[in-house]
Image (cartoon, rainbow, N blue to C red):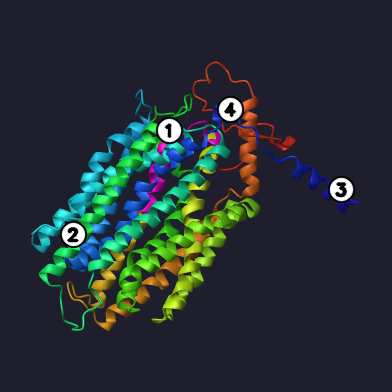
Amino acid sequence: MNRHRNKDVGEEKQSLVIDVEEIKDEDRLPVWRKVCFAIGGAPYQMTNTVINFFLSIFLLEVAKIPPLYVSVIVFSGKAWDAVTDPMIGILVSRTNTRFGKLRPWILFSTPFGCAAYFFMWYVPDFSDEGKLAYYFVFYCLFQGFLTCLHVPYTSLTMYITGSQKERDSATAYRMVSEAIGVLLASLVQGQLINEYRIAGDCKDDKATASPTQLENQKLSYIYGSAVMIGIYLVCSITTFFGTREKQGIATDDSESFCTGLKLVLGCKSYVCLSFAFLFISLAIAVVQGNLALFTTHTLNLGDYFTTFMVILLATSICSIPIWQKILVRFGKKSTYAAGIILFIPTLLSQLYITDNIYVYYAILVLAGFSVAVSLLLPWSMLPDVLDEFMLKTGQRKDAIFYSFYVFFNKLAAGLALGISQVVLEIGGYQTGECRQPSSVGLALRLLIVPGPVIFCLIALIFLWMYPIDEDRRKQIRSLIAEKKKKPAGPQKKQQSPPPPDEAFLTSASYNTIDEFSTEC
């Protein structure tokens, strides 16, 4: 009897948390606005894809900077983001103009970011120390101006509509746009670079590029930067004029930065999700940043590098709808974990792979399925954390949340590239030489396998600690819907941001937000 009674109670409880979507007309986004919003994510992903795939080989093979200097440039540039990301986040949160809080940052930072990006791919006639200073300055400048675009852009997700379902839909559009941008950047830059790149193709092991070959390589990077700048400008302008910030979404900007930071980092859900994002990004960045060198000096397949990139990224794009269906069926947390687990055997295979191009194609397809999860899930899960934080504190700190989230992603790329250059130096990399000693190939193989596998396992631990599973997410949204139904007092009406316009039938055990007895 007890068993049947428990079953009935369980079925009753399950029926009480069924999603019931009711989106008001003012919260519904037309497709063209979602597209205009989504396009704004392309510049960040495109430029970072080019940097992550090509910056190392550009500095080593074209600018001819020693690996240790390269590690200083890339790591210090990302360390600079430790200052700019939170700083820009707090400045954005305090901005109010007739064009909105976020969109002006996207538009007015764009010309400066484009200029810094162009000069970052120019090779000055300086000494090694002079080049170190030159690329350090322009790399830091570009990262700073890119932050001025990306922090407000990611925060814009919470301002374009009050409906969580519409936010998720806009995020899906954004993921597709970013994936297409990544593929386009890889094709354009890859074709230009492969046309004139000579690394690994010399008959003489001690040969170096002739002045004409070196000049052609320099021009290929300049042309590639010009294409990226044009796309950067078009996307930023489209997002500025094609989106609107919803009125009435209030944020609490009266507290100091340190107080807001303490609130943000005191949120367990945010900390767990951010560190899971950091370590999976670190694993992917190590592989991404060394793929060109690995295929050239370890597998002797450098001529196929562009093809490898296209397969990897095209698979990621095509698998996004598949992961979306899995997400709906099993929830965000479980889907994220499955993608990370799938990436581990892909990494382990790099220890044994030889120059068999067809086997490597299959490995890249499997890797593409895993990378798609890192594109889709982290940004889709963050709004759930923001809603939980709002329920717990009654405040919105979206700009600070997003700024540190972006920082973790950039920090991962900086650490990956910096560590990689140190390993290359230890492995005996010879700057400017067409062929590298066998020790470099071994160093690259060991670089791609043990570290990223460990990073994936750490990411899984933090994801296991992440408290918002599918049932918890529905409870959060139910409480938000319930809070919306309650009449607000005249003093609190100005401070309470409108919750997502989604109604849920909630059980009697969740009648008040005070009963949401959990740590944020």
Residue 304 vertical position relative to residue 161 in the rendered view, above or below: below
At horizontal 26% and vertical 58% (from top left) the residue drawn is: 74
* Residue 15 as seen in the image, left or right of residue 137: right
The mark nearer the N terminus, 2 or 4, is 4
The mark nearer the N terminus, 3 or 2, is 3
Query: Closer to the camera, 295 or 481?
Result: 295
Q: Which residue is labeled 3 in the image?
A: 5
Of badges 1 and 2, the one in the foreground is 2
Of badges 2 and 4, the one in the foreground is 2
At horizontal 25% and vertical 75% (from top left) the residue drawn is: 426
The mark nearer the N terminus, 1 or 2, is 2
Residue 436 image offset from top left, x and y in percent: 23, 79
Label 4 secondary element? helix
Which span is picked out in magenta? 391-410
At horizontal 48% and vertical 68% (from top left) the residue drawn is: 365
Label 3 secondary element? helix
Residue 36 image offset from top left, x and y in percent: 43, 38
* Residue 349 as seen in the image, left or right of residue 307: right
Is residue 392 part of the magenta span, yes or no? yes
